[in-house]
Amino acid sequence: MTIALALRNVTKRFGDVLAIDDATLEVEHGEIHALLGENGAGKTSLMNVLAGLYRPDSGEIELHGRSVQIHSPEDAKKQGVGMVHQEQRLVARFTAPENVSLGHTQPRWLVRQRFFRDLAARLSSRYRLPIDAEHPVWNLPLGHRQRVELVKLLHHGAVTIILDEPTANLAPTEIETFFEAVRQLAQSGRTVVFITHKLDEVIRYTDRVTIMRAGRVIATFPTAETSRERLNQLMVGAAEPAHEGAAHPSGPPVLSIAGLNISDPTRRSSLREVNLRLHAGELMALAGVAGNGQTELAEAITGHVPAYQGTIHVAGHDIRGRGPRAVHRLGVAYVPENRRDVGLVAGQSVAVNLALRRYDRPPFSSRGWLDHAAMRREAVELVDRYGIQPPDPDLAVGKLSGGNQQRVIIAREFSGDPRLIVADKFTRGLDPRSTQQFTHELFAHRDRGAAVLWITGDLSEALVCDRIAVMNRGQVVAVLDRAEATRERVGLLMSGDPSLSSL
Amino acid sequence: MALALVRRSDRRDPSQARDDTAVATTAAAWLIGLGGAIAAFSAFIVILGQNPVDILQAVIGGAFGSPVALNRTLARTIPLLLLSSGLILAFRARFWNIGLNGGMFMGAIASSGIALYNPTAPGWLIVPLMLIAAVGAGIVWSLIPGVMRVRFGAPEIIVSLLLNYIALRINDFLVFSYWKDPNGRGFPGSATFNEDFWLPRIADTNAHLGLLFGVLAVGVVWLIVTRTVWGLEVDLVGQGPRAASYLGLNTSRVILFVSAVSGGLAGLAGAGEVAGLNHRLEAGITQDLGYTAILVVSLGLLRPWFTALSAVVVAALLSGGTQLQVQFALPSAIAGVLLWAMLYGVINAQNLAERARR
């Protein structure tokens, strides 16, 4: 085997923070190489060096045995290095072929609809990556968009491909097809580096794995020679989240939904005849592939949907006509799916963001006058308790890392003893250690007597809950007890009719 | 006793911490930006073959150097204080109200109407009525884009801008026709108001009651922005509209609030021009200060006291610029070059400072 890519002794510092500490990574030609680590371990930073986004303070890059200088994404492209970023970087209003052709070297007048379609067909068949050429990419499922990104890289001649947590938003079936495509790329002689913190995917889909922790490379070895436990231990030195004790549901339902229908053409999906009951002291998973109505259901429960048929009761109160504020005051906490835009105000301090739910009431304000000191005192406590880094309540929340932003939302929503917690994919972007910590926290709230609805597309998360409600195309297709739920069964229910989830 | 002291400092410190660093950043941005702007401006003057020191001296002298100069500067400072303090709130909510010129016209017209149609009424009654009418007219005028935005999603930039021209025409119409002074020798303006209706002022200077209102407006806006729930909600709507709706914040109410406040203060600024300064309605009474205020708040980075300072600076440049024409036969627009250089310098310095703090 020959070395396709080597990063030697790379160090990168941001101010006082050592993001990459003397990291050395070797990737062999034609392999799928996992780069495994917690949030902030330096995986993405290291790959950003390779992709020309960061300039290292020291260290060398070698491609196919030659030492190269990569100072910009343009340089990286010339060297055949392409990266699919965590946040997708497609132009939402363009179709797939239009996106693929961005940055094209051919003259502009060549760029026509027919040309696009031919190109799309050619590329799709060449790389065996079916893509939709007709619709703007914002209309496509996330899995398809990822394929578009891949096709775009290949079209621009990438031979070394970096994937930054590409499966974060994919359904189990989509993940399978995605990796089939990736495997094909590797077999055709391309080299793939796959950034992740999901152990399952490392074991199942990669040839070798390099583990990073706190900016350092800890170890590299063939995936076949290792196990989940070993990887996890190397990565964090802790065990995986697991089911914690039995549920003790009690009293009348905290949340009761009857005959809920939402059909609003401006929303992504509609809901049909949803019936759910959730008791105090119970943790329920709302499992489903993204875009099957879970988020709509969460929004309806939390008072964000003004028009619906059916009834929603929270702790015995009909919430019809109550806005998000009034519903929150019934004791409903909501960790929204889209944390950056929805759950936080990036320009405001951590302290203000932690107080967003309650700034208009004592102790944070009285008669319209804010008490910044009180907000800050509370913030200092929450920052400490939830391990928000850096521990500075005055910092603008937009300057925190994604995982820490999520911590801020969780800290805010979980505090104040809510009686119902709706958490929409709340572990997204969190590393295993934090996932474990906050899952534990969810169970603690359940044991305290809160009802918890955990929306997730991840089977291992769904299976630790007390009950699992599965959603597909706007309907709750099944509610299973934990004892009767298996990985296969839930997975199958999530994907609905298998023939619909192909392409 | 000692415990009480500790608790006290404990209470003060936390809220101060955030403000202090931000104020320091802004102050640094100002110093660097202004320094750079003056350097660039000097180079420009050298190219024109003049001595920059002389020019800067003339500008400063023309703004503050004599009672006449001070009066001229003051005449522009007062409306700019009123206009820009309201605009701070609107822009913080990202409600791009550029209709202040129109609001100012409407305020001037409303207060003039009160004065012209009640020429013999007592001053203690008419002056407050004039001010109230002006504020009311400004609010109503400015609520048009506010309501259209909230109800129909109409872009306030377009609506408020176009309303400026309508206000301008209404003003022209009045001063050229019904309200035209018969003894004005054809000059487009109303008759001079009854002297009882003039705003009280210090001696014979331009320091009329509007100055007090202007300073008060800055102070109140500062309190709103830094200390109140309203101010925070204005910022939330501006910086995180989606978060605001997730929280269930009534965004429409905030938009209407800022459009009303900015319009009311613009109306008051208009009243100041007719009742405090010119003592009659004239064509072009606003001197386009409604637009200048946009520049003032940009220079002040939407912070109330920095904005007040930039209102003074901008007024001084506008007023000192006239001196260049007299002394050096340079176009008075040269002062505008310095103004834009300053704006450019300060905004860039602020961006750099923000980035450096990361």
Image (spheres, rainbow, N blue to C red):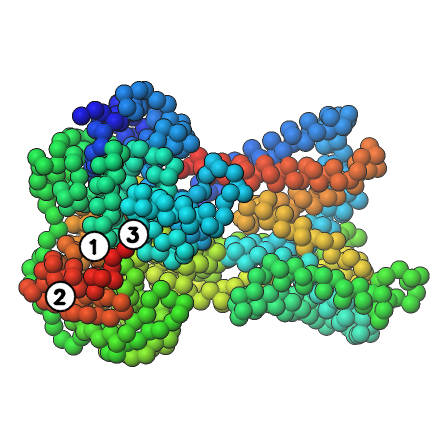
Element on which disc 3 rests: helix
Secondary structure beneath dot 2 equals: strand
Does residue B339 appear left or right of residue B32 in this picture? right
Residue identified by numbered label 1: A173
Q: Amino acid at mark 1?
A: Thr
The tag on residue A143 is: 3
Q: Name the amino acid, label 3.
A: Gly
Question: For the residue labelled by badge 1, is the local secondary structure a helix, a strand or a loop?
Answer: helix
Chain of the residue that carries numbered disc 2 in the rendered image: A
User: Three-letter amino acid code at disc 2?
Assistant: Arg
Q: Is residue A18 above or below residue B346?
A: above
Residue A467's label in the rendered image is 2
The answer to whether residue A312 is seen in the rendering is no
Going 18% across and 25% down the picture, which residue do you hit? Answer: A1
Q: Is residue A174 visible from the viewing direction of this image?
A: yes
Is the same chain shared between marks 2 and 1? yes
